Amino acid sequence: MGVRLGSADRFTIDELIVTCISRQAKNSDLMAQGIATPLVVAGYILAKLTHAPDLIFAVAIGGCITNSWAPLSISRAEEANLERPLYIFSFDEAAGTLMFTIQPKEFFRPAQVDPRGDFNNVVLGDYYAPKLRLPGCGGIADVTNYSPRVYLYVPRHSRAVFVERLDFVSGVGVLEEEERKELSILSPGPRYLVTNLGTFDFEGGRMRLLSYHPGVRVERIQKKTGFPLAMAPDLHETPPPSAEEVMLLREEIDPLGIRELERLSGGRRRAKLREIIEREAEGF
């Protein structure tokens, strides 16, 4: 899907998602990178190459903190991260000490989200007889209890993702003050959410539409959401990526198009993955 950027240039929806992620990073922030999140990684690198040159990354692949970066890769991702690390850590150290102490900004990709921003990455259906067992929370249950820097992204906005009631809660959303105290929850809940249709926050305790992407109607966003959305008073169209941002993504950050994998499924994803691996083997 392409959207017009100007008279000569165009951007794709994955490039707009990456740009929205990039805009959430401020200079000198510490940004946590999970596993298999190329849209997020591309967004962090884009921020570092544009408005946040002092950005630091806490990287799950290879387990390190670094201020360097390399183009997105499947076969060489860990090698690039470990080339010039500032600090190397174990997963136990990251989950039990570092994340709680330094509290980086982090984007999570949920399988389900409810109106107040609770989310699920564990199971679809009954926990003991699931329709689908998901990858698990990987520390999300801990991080979302205390971190004030939780962000979400959903590459494919649908009623299957945005549901009135979760099948399982693995990430904490925006709770009433009394409930937060009762459960000893320190986090205020997710700060921001971007999908392929728009951007959102949870101001007031409910998912609220901030902006709609170019070419997307508000009615379509509501139809694709399984509960009524709140609307920001200054609801507007999402600003598109600049020509420079598109160039950086395509030529320097992700020339193989690895970011596209998060929006593909089935045969199209397999074909794209095969193409990427073949180009990497050829030394691209």
Image: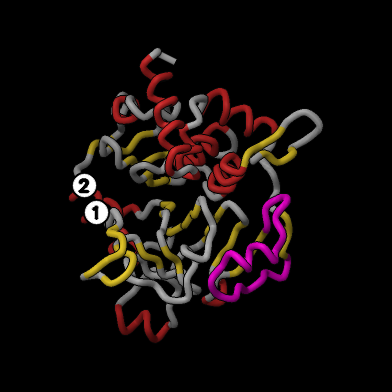
Give the Cα distance between marks 2 and 1: 6 Å
Q: Which image quarter: residue 279?
A: top left
Percent from the top left, x then y, of residue 197?
62, 55
Residue type at numbered disc 2: Phe
Q: What residue do we see at 59% from left, 28% from top?
A: 248
Q: Which residues are magenta?
A: 212-234
Q: What residue do we see at 37% from left, 69% from top?
A: 172
Q: Is residue 28 visible?
A: no
Is 72 displayed left or right of 138 in the figure?
Answer: right
Specify the farthest residue to the top. 282
Is 198 displayed left or right of 146 in the figure?
Answer: right
User: Which residue has dot 2 on it?
Assistant: 91
Give the tally of numbered discs: 2
- The answer to whether 76 is drawn above or below residue 204 in the figure is above
Q: Is residue 60 magenta?
A: no
User: Is disc 2 in contact with disc 1, using a CB cutoff of under 8 Å?
Assistant: yes
Percent from the top left, x then y, of residue 75?
33, 26
